[in-house]
Amino acid sequence: MDYKDYYQTLGVDKTASKDQIKKAYRKLARQYHPDVNPSDAEAERKFKEINEANEVLSDDEKRQKYDQLGADWQRYQQAGAGRGGQPGGGFDWSQYTQGGGFGDDDPFGGTDFSDFFSSMFGGMGGGSARPRGGQDYQAELELTLAEAYHGGPRTLTVNGKNLRITIQPGVEDGQVIRLRDQGGPGRSGGPHGSLYITLRIRPDARYSRTGNDLTMDVPVSIYTALLGGEQTVETLSGPVKITIKPETQNGTRLRLRGKGFPVYRQAGQFGDLYLRLSLTLPQHLTEQEKSLFRQLADLRK
């Protein structure tokens, strides 16, 4: 039976905090999740290893016991194995297994974990299965910028189950939403796990977003830029009429207060919308138009 280096499996140091372990687990679980890698046996194997490592390192009692065994593992290997592949040679395995393996009351589902895990933790609980929370699930939900702006109901499918959720206005790209009790079933009467949904917001051709502020390019004719005038701009909250001053330069920025992105979970609060004016030049000039521009150029000499 081989030793399982759970720290190496999650890619963390032995001094890693619980938050660091949790973050590493979620990242790897998303990468190797069966929904992301259908029919990939290697990814499925990695996913099981990741879950097993998290099962141990996220539990204070199991982690302490595992760390203690790590220091003695070399002595265990030197002691050799007894009949049937069980530890022997004088090595006191019982201090880690608390009485050995388990039978029909396996609280961990048997085939979901390695022999190494089963040998160490199968007997925990004194023969009665301790309630354990179910596995957390990971999923992603893609949104347009307008959908992230307005929020509203959305439906996604996780492990064959359709879930209807409500997106709050103002969510950000990469934001994670937790749904309690939507993960895997608990063991021995334990609660269901949670579902963690990572939101992915598609880039928008019109707007760029910085926090709760938006920026967009607004084409302006050279005539309006020179003489001034009004122009209607389409924003995510609807059309807005802006005033352009005479002799406005190319690249001028205008600020529309409260026309940016809604502030997440702060009703009625919005960022700002910045308009970057981009002058457009007329094309396909007639001879008469060219003549008029020449006259204007001569006047400016």
Image (tube, rainbow, N blue to C red):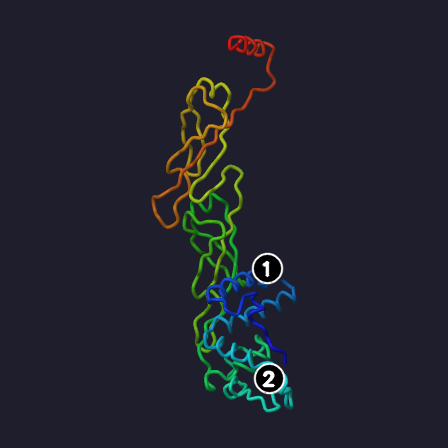
Residue 12 % position (x, y): 54, 66
Residue 11 % position (x, y): 57, 65
Q: Is residue 138 above or below residue 265?
A: below
Residue 36: mark: 1
Q: Residues within 10 Å of mark 1 (few under 14, many from 20)?
A: some
- Residue shown at 58%/88% (left/top)? 91
What is the total number of numbered labels drawn onto the structure image? 2
- Residue shown at 60%/77% (left/top)? 3
Q: Is residue 149 above or below residue 86?
A: above
Residue 75: mark: 2
Three-letter amino acid code at the position of disc 1: Val
- Residue shown at 58%/68% (left/top)? 8
In this view, the residue in front, 281 or 157, is 281
The quadrant the N terminus occupies is bottom right
Q: Secondary structure at mark 1?
A: loop
Q: Nearer the viewer, mark 1 or mark 2?
A: 2
Q: CA distance from mark 1 to mark 2?
A: 41 Å
Q: Are marks 1 and 2 in contact (CB under 8 Å)?
A: no
Q: Is 84 situated left or right of 277 in this image?
A: right
